[in-house]
Image: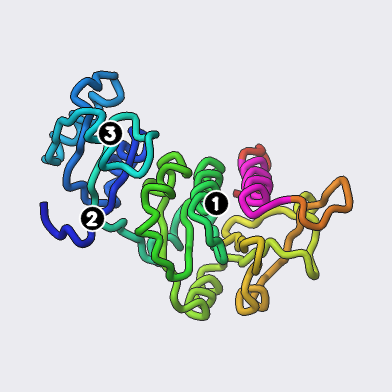
Amino acid sequence: MKETQTQHLLEGNISIKAALLSGNRILYSLIVDKKKKDRDTLFILKEAKRKKVTIQYKSREEIDALSSGKTHGGLLAYCGERKFQTLEELLHTKPCFLAFIEGIEDPFNFGYIVRTLYAAGCKGILIPPRNWTSAASTVAKSSAGASEYIPMCIVDDFPSVLQQFKQNNIALLCGHRKDAIALYDFTFPKKFCLAIGGEMRGLSKQVIEQSDQNLYIPYHQEFKNALNAASATAVFAFEIARQHYQKNSNF
């Protein structure tokens, strides 16, 4: 193996299969329980051999000692850093449903949000600079592998991103209650980026000030803190999906 200082551990069939198939990481080696013979594992091993990934067979006890928990199912993978996409690559996706995620501190919540967005048809996620590499296994597992599949771009110059949005007619829509309209009264345009903030700090001022439209989720009860970021993302994302699949959709 090489570049050992940059290697990260993925655990479980779902995460490792996603990493193998997406091509967004280099996989250096697989460690598999020598008694593990299920069809999904055999597919993973076949794909790993095709990509010339080293395979080591060990006992379940040895694998338990290497892993961070007991939910690995007898399969581990040492891999490199995730490859991120450029903003230019995301701007020309069709349909252009992008998401900007800000202020999410917990890797489980980040994974849940990514999982929901991917399932709802989001084509790319923009995130501020943040070292998620130490939590790669948690994010991959909580997102059910979606974090490996969905294109992601690190944004370190938001004004430049906004300029490119405007040049490409991409609307910035913020999940923010001030000066907002109800989600179900809004028709999503053909090209947009949905901005979602964490529960503690929400979206930053520089994002909100550039919003083309703020949207809020109407509640049946007067309950200000009803939904966390992952739950709110699900509501937004699947209303977008509902509009997307309507016959007279704008998408």
Relative image position of residue 80 (x, y in whole percent):
24, 55
Stretch in magenta: 227-244
Q: Which residue is mark 1?
A: 109
Q: Mark 3 or mark 1: name the one nearer the start of the chain.
A: 3
- At label 3, counting other C-alpha atoms closer than 10 Å, the crowd grade (few under 14, some 14-19, many 20 or more) is many
- Residue found 51% across the figure and 54% down from its top: 110
Q: Which residue is mark 3?
A: 75
Residue 18: name its quadrant: top left
Q: Nearer the viewer, residue 173 or 189?
A: 173
- Residue found 63% across the figure and 46% down from its top: 234
User: Please, is residue 55 above or below residue 222 in the view?
Assistant: above
Q: Nearer the viewer, residue 146 or 90?
A: 146
Label 1 SS: helix
Mark 1 touches mark 2? (CB < 8 Å):
no
Q: Nearer the viewer, residue 170 or 178?
A: 178
Main secondary structure along the magenta-highlighted residues: helix
Looking at the rendered structure, the kind of residue marked 2 is Gln
Label 2 SS: loop
Q: Which mark is residue 7?
A: 2
For residue 39, side relative to residue 87 (left or right): left
